[in-house]
Image: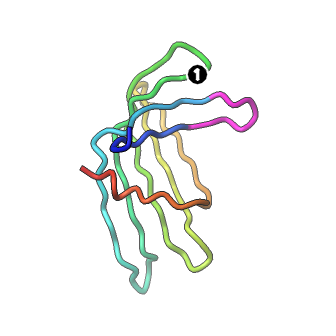
Amino acid sequence: NKNELYFANVAATNDDQSFGKVLNLKNDHSEETEKTYQADEFTFRWKYYNSYDTESGYATVSFTKIYKPTGIVFTLKMVTQKLDVLTFTGYMEGSLNIKEYLE
């Protein structure tokens, strides 16, 4: 749907993925200071389905975009229903304006 945002965690080695709808998306923006870079933190609840098994469920996700002079860095922290904590970091490519999906 045009007004819905979906999220996927894709394994590059075998194309397995967890995917699903983003719910309750919220944004907290912080301006650059002498000690920190400008950043946007997006928090949401994720209703996911796995392509590689029959599991589905919800996870709480915090996705932070940090605007550095060399590019946009991201950190992603996900807490699953089983209370597993997954953390990812990297550089962003492409241009998705996540803010248009805020409630």
Check disc 1 and give the amino acid type: Ser
Report the residue that reaches farthest toward the top. Answer: 54
Position above or below: 49 against 29 = above
Per the rendered image, the range of residues in magenta is: 9-16
Q: Is residue 103 left or right of residue 100?
A: left
Q: Residues within 10 Å of mark 1 (few under 14, many from 20)?
A: some
Position above or below: 17 against 98 = above
Q: Is residue 51 left or right of residue 42?
A: right
Which of the pair 19/89 is nearer the observer? 19
Horizontal and vertical percent position of residue 57: 40, 23
Position above or below: 28 against 86 = below
* Residue 21: quarter of image: top left
Horizontal and vertical percent position of residue 49: 48, 23
Horizontal and vertical percent position of residue 99: 35, 58
Report the residue that reaches farthest toward the left. Answer: 103
Q: Which residue is mark 1?
A: 51
Horizontal and vertical percent position of residue 63: 44, 52
Q: Residue at x 55, y 67 (%)?
A: 72
Q: Main secondary structure of the magenta part?
A: loop
